[in-house]
Image (cartoon, rainbow, N blue to C red):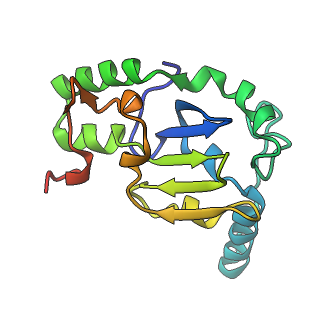
């Protein structure tokens, strides 16, 4: 695994494209599908606060040249993020290891999938726990929802389950309630 899930930094994203599903663990910032809308909002906020504008875009950035990520250009993006792809089995094993050394709350915050992006249906679902509204920064003709999407994931890809049993119940949240 290129990077481990880390609450509020590296998130777990399920992505579907052309009927194929894959998990990715990467920096959360690359998953705002419409970066232009996000930058406009940031620019307005800076102006209101009287702060300078600092946009740091690197040519090494996986999103370079893809300000709006959608079904028309995802095929250019996927090779750039291949290093972040992780299998369900690998996620499950890392999560089980984390459960041996971290609290249930920490494991829940780090391993609960944050986003499910279906490029075939042009839908983004978010369960991200902090106020970063991925569902508000979408390409034209896309739909976004802040809702539980765990049941939309095929059982074989549900890394939080093993032998038809949940290893951890993400629906109970970090505090187990």
Residue at the farthest right position: 65
Residue at the farthest left position: 177
Q: Residue at x 31, y 45 (%)?
A: 109
> To which quarter of the image does residue 142 belong?
bottom right
User: Along the horizontal axis of the image, is 22 left or right of 6?
Assistant: right
Q: Is residue 63 above or below residue 176?
A: above
Q: Is residue 19 above or below residue 129?
A: above
Q: Is residue 70 above or below residue 146?
A: above
Residue 173 seen in this snapshot = no
Q: Position of residue 64 (x, y in %)?
A: 81, 39
Residue at the farthest bottom position: 48
Residue 87 seen in this snapshot = yes
Q: Residue at x 50, y 22 (%)?
A: 86
Q: Position of residue 19 (x, y in %)?
A: 62, 35
User: Along the horizontal axis of the image, is 91 left or right of 145?
Assistant: left
Q: Is residue 126 above or below residue 131?
A: above
Asked whether 167 or 84 is in front, the reply is 167
> To which quarter of the image does residue 98 belong?
top left
> To which quarter of the image does residue 108 belong?
top left
User: Exactly how many numbered labels are in the figure?
Assistant: 0
Q: Residue at x 73, y 56 (%)?
A: 35
Asked whether 56 or 13 is in front, the reply is 13
Q: Position of residue 30 (x, y in %)?
A: 64, 44
The quarter of the picture where the C terminus appears is bottom left
Q: Residue at x 57, y 59 (%)?
A: 134
Q: Position of residue 155 (x, y in %)?
A: 36, 33
């Amino acid at each position: 695994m290129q990077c481990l899930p880390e609450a509020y930094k590296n998130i777990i994203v399920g992505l579907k494209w052309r009927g194929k599903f894959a998990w990715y663990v990467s920096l959360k910032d690359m998953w705002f599908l419409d970066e232009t809308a996000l930058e406009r909002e940031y620019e307005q906020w800076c102006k209101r606060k009287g702060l300078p504008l600092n946009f740091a875009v690197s040519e090494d950035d996986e999103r370079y040249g893809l300000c709006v990520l959608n079904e028309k250009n995802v095929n250019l993006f996927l090779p750039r993020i291949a290093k972040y792809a992780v299998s369900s089995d690998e996620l499950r094993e890392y999560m089980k290891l984390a459960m041996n050394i971290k609290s249930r709350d920490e494991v829940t915050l780090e391993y609960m999938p944050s986003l499910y992006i279906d490029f075939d249906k042009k839908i983004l679902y978010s369960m991200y726990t902090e106020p970063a509204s991925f569902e508000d920064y979408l390409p034209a003709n896309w739909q976004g929802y802040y809702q539980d999407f765990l049941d939309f994931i095929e059982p074989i890809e549900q890394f939080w389950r093993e032998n038809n049993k949940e290893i951890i119940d993400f629906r109970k949240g970090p505090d187990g309630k």
